Each structure stands twice: as structure tokens, then as C-alpha cells.
Image: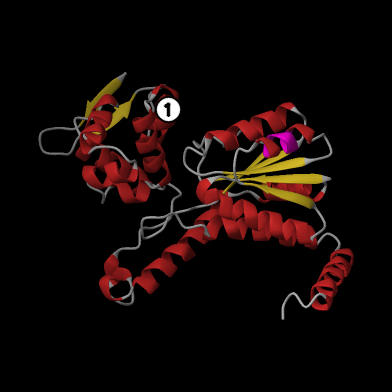
Amino acid sequence: MLYYVGNATTSHTIMTVEAGKPKRVSDLLEQGFDGFSRSQKAIARYIIDHLDEIGYLSAEELARKGNTSSSTVVRFAQSLGFTGYPELQKAARDEFRLGAGTRPVVHEDQLLLRVEEDFLTRALRTDILSLEETLAKNRLPDFDRAAGIIAGAGRLLAVGLHEAAIVAQHAAYVFELLGIATVAVTDGSEANFARLVQLGSADALLAVGFRRAHPQTVSFIRQAVAGTAGTVAITDNSLSSLAGQADVTLFADIDSTFFAHSLVGPLSLVGALAAAIYSRDREAYDSRLRAVREQVNESDWLK
């Protein structure tokens, strides 16, 4: 049950009573997530992953982030028990200030140069923060387990559609160089489903997808799990449709300063997995890499 606390001279703060303890905005969103509509889920995902920003975003700006309307944002805030979006903003801001483990907002006045004069600085600083967030989101035991699954795979499917295709293709490139037979799956062709069916318990599937994730990527990983292949997922948040589907889920931040997501985090995560696998037997991998490069040189491919 929801209650409001405060008086005529102080701002109201929303609370829920559960064993006498106040509930956070992120708790309300996570607990009610399954019952939200598609638009509400998009808003909830953004709030949970960007709690530090919500206090500075208007309803219109948040609506654009979730590909919905400002009226939907307002109605969503009210459905959570807030009087309106401003009260949800205040509760999110209070939660963040009380110690939510999210990254700080970089405001325009904190940059070395004015934003409108230097998009390079703003974009690269955002990517630096994205890498820090990616590091903070992952536990080393999970990362090591993911590296072990990929290193031990007889065959590996790296699945990613739309923007995630770039990450899947990069994964196929680096893991193939290490001697892991890898195919990048970037569409739902019949040939790719045939490859999925052929996966056995000695094989693995790496699924990459962000926000809602492509339905075919979700389908691929569910079928791989049912077929006993090892599975690793790379996504951007714990409410993604890929999160929790795989044996191991790793998280990569994808925030950017413009209209497309930044892939610095997920690409770096793939690179880190490749480095971890390489470190297990440097001599063997060096021998393979030398053989590959000798063939490249002899074929005059680089000339």
C-alpha cells in the first residue's frame, strides 16, 4: 500500500510500507516490471539504468529515451502512486543521493570546453564513463566463467542482430583467431538455424543484445539452453530480455551523446574475454597466430 509523508511546507516523498521500511523507486519498478506495458517497461528500464539522470530530464526528454510520449510518462508516474512526474523525479534524485551505485552525471559546465564547440570531448568522456560503468556492472567470477565457456567450446555461435551484429562479428573475428571455430549469426536465415540445431553440449553460444534485444536473439539463446550448449549473454541491463537467460550474463553500458548507442563497452568486453582466453596458454595461441600471419604474408593479402 502506498503512503505519502510530509507536510504543507515540505516536499512529499513516496514510500511503500513493507515491514516498516521505505521502498526505493528502483524497487517499485523492478517489482512491478512484469505487469507493465511495453512502453512502461522501456521507461522503467531507462530509469533503473540512469537513476542519476532522471532528476534532470523533463517528461518529454524521458519519453524520447523510451520511444514513447510525455503523457505516457506522466501516467506511468501516477500509476506508481506519485502525484505526477516531478514527484517521481524527486524520489529518484533522493535515492541516487542516498547512495545508489550509479555513475555521476557529466554536466556541460564540467567539460573542459563548451559542448557546442567540442563534441569530441563530450563523446569521448561519455565513452570513458561507459567503460567505467561496464567494469562496475560485472563480477570477476562471472567474467571468468564466461571466458571458460567460450574457451572450451568446440564450436561457437556469436549471435547479434541489428546494432549488436557489430559486436557479434568482432567476437567471431577474435575468437576465430584464437582457434575457436566461430560463426557470426547476424540474421535469422535458415542456415543459421541449422547451425543452432547442430550445437551440442561441447559447443557454446554467445548472444548479444541491448534494451529489449532482438526476438530472434532471445529465441536462439533459449534453444541453445534447451539443447545443453554452454551460453553467455552480453546485454546492457538486468531487465533486458536476455538477462538471466544464459549460463552467464555480462553487462555492458551503451550510453552515448547522440542518436545511436555506443558500442565501446560491449566491444571492450569481448576484447577482455579474448585476452583472458589468450592468457590461459600464450605459447599455443602465439604459435597459431604466427601461422595465420605467415599465411597472410605469403598470400600477399596485405599488399
**Image point 67% across, 51% down: which residue?**
140
**Image point 79% across, 34% down: which residue?**
198
Residue 279 in the image: state x and y as whole percent.
Answer: 80, 63
Can residue 247 be seen here?
Answer: no
Q: Where the C terminus falls, by quadrant? A: bottom right
Amino acid on which disc 1 is placed: Phe
Quadrant hosting residue 160: top right
The image's colouring method is secondary structure
**Residue at the left extreme of this rendering:** 8
Q: Is residue 213 left or right of residue 113?
A: right
Q: Is residue 134 left or right of residue 75?
A: right
Residue 9 in the image: state x and y as whole percent.
Answer: 11, 38
**Residue at the bottom extreme of this rendering:** 303
Which of 278 and 160 lies nearest the eye of the viewer? 160
Magenta residue span: 192-196
Total residue callouts: 1
In the image, residue 35 above or below residue 144: above
**Image point 70% across, 38% down: which residue?**
191
Label 1 crowd bin: few (<14), some (14–19), many (20+), radius 10 Å = some
The residue singled out by tag 1 in the image is: 33
Which of 69 and 96 lies nearest the eye of the viewer? 69
Does the segment drawn in magenta span residue 194? Answer: yes
Q: Is residue 285 left or right of residue 252?
A: right
Residue 179 in the image: state x and y as whole percent.
Answer: 82, 57
In the image, residue 283 above or below residue 84: below
Does the segment drawn in magenta span residue 189? Answer: no
User: Label 1's element?
Assistant: helix
Dominant SS of magenta comes to: helix
**Image point 55% across, 45% down: which residue?**
161
Q: Where the N terminus falls, by quadrant? A: top left
Residue 2 in the image: state x and y as whole percent.
Answer: 29, 22
